[in-house]
Image: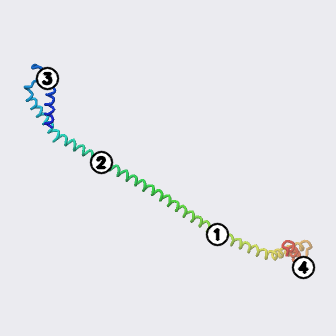
Amino acid sequence: MANRINFYLILFSFLFYKEAFASNEGMPQLNPEFWISQIFWLTLVFGTLYVLLSKFILPKISNNLETRKSQIVENIGAAEKQREESDQKIKDYENIINEAKIEAKNIFNQAREKISKDINNKKESLKKEIDEEIKKAEAEILDLKNKSPEKINKIAIETSADLIKQIIGTEVNSSNISAIVEDISKKNEEKYYGN
């Protein structure tokens, strides 16, 4: 670097040779008798600057740049990793939601089937109970139907005997009244039941 600077200085001095020697009373920098000291100080100052820059300042700057570069790369890697993790978490969340929907649907279907079975069982049970009650009622009606002519006849005979006794004032033979009531009863049965 110092050699290069010296080369440029010498080249510069040849280019401006005439102007440098044109006047003895001009600028002292252009006076050739001061050139050696100027070149010495120029070389010393720029050499020192070169050494300071190349050995101390530039390596620190380079290290800082490398540190920043590695930090940026590390941050990009961490951000990419976090993005991948967040994508995975989103996928996991969507899977959990889908599984929850499927499970809820299954639970709903099972509950609906169970309720349907319970309703059908209760329907069957209620139907059996109603059928039993109908059979009991039919049996009671049939029993009442079978027993009612006898009771009606008995009530009719007693009532008729009491009425005749009150009208005539004397008691009538109950067998005669019984025969008349039974005859009327048979006619009514034929009329209503078609027997």
Q: Which sits in the foreground, 129 or 119?
A: 119
Which residue is disc 4 drawn over? 176
**Circle 3: residue type:** Lys
Q: Which sits in the foreground, 68 or 102?
A: 68
- Disc 1 and disc 3: Cα gap in Å? 130 Å
x, y percent for residue 107: 52, 62
Q: Residue at x 36, y 51 (%)?
A: 82
- Disc 3 and disc 4: Cα gap in Å? 183 Å
Q: Residues within 10 Å of mark 4 (few under 14, many from 20)?
A: few
Q: Residues within 10 Å of mark 1 (few under 14, many from 20)?
A: few
Which image quarter holds the C terminus?
Answer: bottom right
Q: Is residue 87 above or below residue 2?
A: below
- Disc 4 and disc 2: Cα gap in Å? 130 Å
Residue 18: mark in rendering:
3
**In the rendered image, which quarter is residue 4 located in?**
top left
For marks 4 and 2 on the same chain, the one whose residue lies earlier in the sequence: 2
Residue 73: mark in rendering:
2
Q: Do tag 3 and tag 4 residues touch (Cβ < 8 Å)?
A: no
